[in-house]
Image (tube, rainbow, N blue to C red):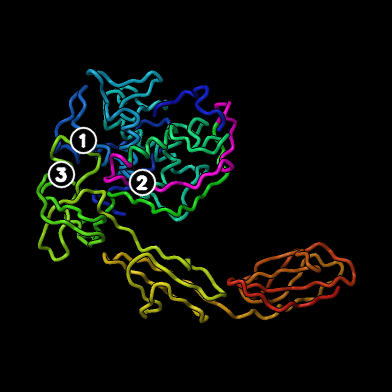
Amino acid sequence: MKSFLLKVGILSALTVSLFNGTASAETASAETASVDTTWSSKCSTLGQIKQNVNPSFQHINCLLTNAAVNADIPPEVVKAIAWKESGWKQFVDGKPLISDDNGIGIMQVTDGGYDTEKLKNDIAYNIQIGVNILNSKYSLKTLPKIKGANRHMIENWYFSVMAYNGIKPVNSPLFQDDGETNTEAYQEEVFSIIEEQSFINETTLAHFPFKTSDFKYDPKLDQNIEFIKLEYTLTNKLHQSAYFYKVNQKVLVTGNKVNLRPNPTSTPTSLKQFTNHIPVIVNGEIRYDLTSVKNQFVWIPIKTVDGKLKGYVASPYIYKENPVVSGVAPGKYYRNTVTIRFNEGTATLNGKAFSNGGSVSKSGNYTLIVKDQANNTTTVKFTVDKTIPAIATVNKVTSKTTKVTGKAEKYATVEIYRSTTRIGTAKVYSSGTFSVNIKAQKKSTVLKVYVKDKAGNVSKKAITVL
């Protein structure tokens, strides 16, 4: 991981996978023992690694891919970082690559505490340490994430990539003085590499709706940025990594006129051209390009659903995305009519066919299941509740009372008002009892007690006079 120098003027202001890998628990600590690089044996068919010689492009592609998958990180991200840091070079002129700021090897590791000689001479070790560092950044609670996105969504690694280089003003996503995008920020350049080299045909990754108020820092100082906003909702389509599929899993070919190749290479020969959103079946482990072409993407072996054709499709065209549902959310309660929409497929509601854009107004518990052509499903359980809660039963209250108790609907919320001022609130226990702390009120004060259920229905008021 290259350290960066704060240059004056730069900122005027500011699933089980094909590899059966498991997530790495190591972080960028000073521990050097038990650094597992057994994943590198999966690339042995591509040649033997020689001392002081960079492996072939596709061999490095394989090493970076397997290290990333083994750590449950999108390989697209790890590959782009390695390209940004070193151009996928461990050695230059037969010697270990060491930058002016002491970054070592393909991942340009500068953090101390590791085996320096292995960082210089063992490309698998260097990659693993870089992956460990990146993985530790993803775990930081102080870095923002995308609401609803998991580890396999490439965009959700934006701030982890930033932290790999440093959460300093030079890497702020926006210039603080004018709000313009800082295209020279480390993570912006890495994500541009992902777009250019891991995808095809001008794919654009989703952009964050940044505001300068999202970050707090002094652009004149080399201190870490403080992130004010820790969760983002992105309206653009997120991009799932192309590397986390099971053999025999049904997936979708996305894009028009996508070629089914007889071999894992971009030859002129095509067995078939797919139209958009055609279901196919993953037919084996990924393959690396047979030619010397420098593509960072890989080839997914697939077969048609009827089993009549088998071949290879470039990984950017293979996608598994559960249908996206809007209008309702899992476990939520609603007191108004809800209109439900989904981006694709067919749906059932409590076992009966449900039309896209349909509405639900009757009180009850519902299970919505949306299924796409590849049988990927999204299930949402929700409740429509229009019943107004019963009036609370309130125990005696006096001018000395500091705890109002009584009975009300289980799991609802009790709110106590003096005129229009709310002076106390508390949840109702599973026993149906409640206890609300208030300040002692003057004699003859009128208190209004309301019960609000999970759906937001509010009871009539219970009036208590001290």
Specify whether 113 is left or right of 266. Answer: right
Magenta range is: 195-223
Specify whether 3 is left or right of 428. Answer: left
Specify whether 155 is left or right of 385. Answer: left
Q: Amino acid at mark 2?
A: Thr
| Kind of element beneath mark 2 | loop
- What residue sits 57% from the left and 38% below the top? 226
| Kind of element beneath mark 3 | loop
Location of residue 296 with respect to 249 vertically, above or below: above
- What residue sits 15% from the left and 44% below the top? 266
The x, y position of residue 108, in whole percent, is 35, 27
Q: Amino acid at mark 3?
A: Ser
Q: Residues within 10 Å of mark 2 (few under 14, many from 20)?
A: some
Q: The C terminus is located in which quarter?
A: bottom right
Q: Amino acid at mark 1?
A: Lys
Q: CA distance from mark 3 to mark 2?
A: 22 Å
Residue that badge 3 annotates: 266
Ranked by sequence position, the earlier of labels 3 and 1 is 3
Mark number, residue 294: 1
Q: Quadrant of residue 410?
A: bottom right
- What residue sits 35% from the left and 29% below the top? 85
Q: CA distance from mark 2 to mark 1?
A: 20 Å
Mark number, residue 205: none
